[in-house]
Image (tube, helix red, strand yellow):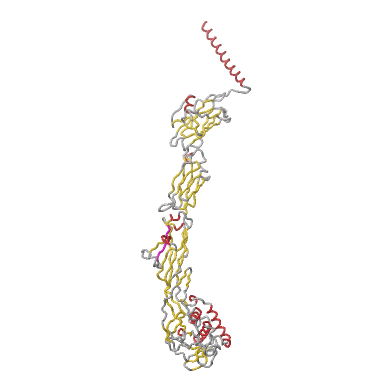
Amino acid sequence: MRVRKKKRLVLLFATGLTLGGLVFSSRSTYIAYAASDNVPQTITTNNAQKTFVTASTGKLYAQYEGEWKEGYGYHRVNIIKEKGKSGRNSYIFCINWSKESPSNKQLTKQYQANPEVQWLVTDFAKGHDRAFERLNNAGADYDLADYWLYQTAIHLVACPNEVSPIDGKKPGDTLDKFAPQVRDKVLRLVNEAKKHKNESDSEIVLNQAKLNFDPSELNINSGDLHGDKYEKSFQVKSDQMHDIQVHAAESKNSKYLSGTRKNGSKVDWNNINADDNLKVSVPYSDMANNSDFSFKVKATGHWNKRAKVAWIYGNNDPNTQHVAKWAIKATTVAMEGDAEMTVHVKPAFGSLTFVKKGSGNNNSKLLPGTEFLLTSDGFMERKTVDGNGRVTFDNLPLGKKYHLKEVKQPNGQYSASYERDIDQLSGDNPQRQVDLGTIINDKTHQPFKLTKKNTNGAGIEGAQFVLLRKDYGEPVGQISLEDAKRQAFRMVNGELVLGHSDQQPYIATTDKDGNTEFPNVLIPKNEKHDYYAVEVKSPNGYALGTTPIKFPNIGITSPDVVSGEMTDTTQPIPTTGSDYLLIEATAAITITCAVGGYAYYVSRKNKKEK
């Protein structure tokens, strides 16, 4: 308040301000509050009528109770203090420019100062070494010098265009007469004050609130699967807070929250403590149809806030000066915003693997190319057995029951008949890796290969055979051609089977190398038998084999190909030239045999007559 002719000029404060909402930010926490405080309801001012200070020239000059120190200055203000207080925190700043300073008056709390004035008042309260600006030539009484500096800035911020009723001047009319370094400090203060547009950045918070989640993101993955639940712990960290509540942003996800107190009792989600053991527990079955799942958890609470603010005091007399005084405002901040934690659940996946073999060669026959189909609710995948006989289904959602079925078997000796339910990936304690071991397909058909050779080891072409089956160990000697053909296998629908006497027996004929085959012979599943190849027709020049070729002890574990061999003991008759030569040679042999027989007969007869 500038005083000329011993009249006090004081600041005009913009009236009609209302309390704005404070927004406090800590990480992802946003708090809005409605004020409720314990600021003193009244203050009493000192006798300010004869106390003045000026420092516009860069030096401090003051008058106490009529005693002047040298110097007058261009901008003097009354020294207004709260009665009974001392030190820097006792100073009071005048608001109204055109009213006298309230000397020896009891004033009542009116409203909170606007952000610009509040920042100047609270920044002054920081002290000489911490304030935004200060005067350096004040000597020991720097509190009084800084008081003049901040009161001058308040004049210029609150009502720069207000005219004094004493001399008609505005608050800034004498700035050009200030010492340059003093004028610069005043203007820097004014510019800084104008940057503060709301209560939250103009007050001084004494107990910053904290409310957040630890961690702020809860990532749950396969390593967090315990039994039948994905579980991971988290905590709510808070300071200067009470009545903390935790809940899922969407109520349907609240079922995934669980927790216990330190003493083991169940947690109260409307009153969370810092040492509560909180968990997110998601049944793995809920993830059976999800590759990723996210939801948000929020925390709310109340902040026991304490802050230095500037409060306006006055009375009902319109002629009474209003003043600004800092005070500690204690409020309970009801949170309308939230601290937030994002929960990400990436489920574990299982695998199913096995080796596919056939029963042939003592269960060692690999069956690559076999195809399997794995199905479940909302799931279907087809896999082919590799060259090592193995097939693996990866990335199988847990919590499902699967059905495995063999759908294609490229090896005709084995049927595509395997199928089973897979329930190891579900239940109370699901497996992550299911190995079915070795799956054996029983052989259903057996080929028999046969070779007929002559005494020189060369193949005999054109020999014809039928195939018989006998009980294991049953002795078989020579058999007539009629019985052999009657008991022989018949070809029906692409496979060699017994019975079907209305069909002709299947006859295998050797090729130029003496080889032939009985393909796709149907064999019983749980029995072993002896099989016999019986020659039913020999080629010209060779004798008919009278002893059947035996294939003993044949069953589903036999080699995939069994072979037999017959050697003809007859010396082949040369057939070089033509068929006619063969007839002539045969006739000559017959004649020779007949002549020789006749001579022998005559000789015996003559001996008897003598």
Name the side, left or right, on which 571 lies relative to 246: right
Give the x, y percent position of residue 558.
48, 37
- Between 566 and 403, the residue placed more toward the observer is 403
As for residue 593 lying within the magenta part, the answer is no
Of all residues, the one furthest to the front in this rendering is 318
- Between 165 and 441, the residue placed more toward the observer is 165
Of all residues, the one furthest to the right in this rendering is 577
Tell me which segment is drawn in magenta. Answer: 276-282
Picture residue at 40% right of the left edge, 68% below the top = 273
As for residue 277 lying within the magenta part, the answer is yes
Of all residues, the one furthest to the bottom in this rendering is 67
Q: Is residue 282 above or below residue 569?
A: below
Name the side, left or right, on which 509 lies relative to 212: right
Give the x, y percent position of residue 173.
56, 87
- Between 585 and 96, the residue placed more toward the observer is 96
Quarter assignment of residue 509: top right
Give the x, y percent position of residue 249.
44, 63
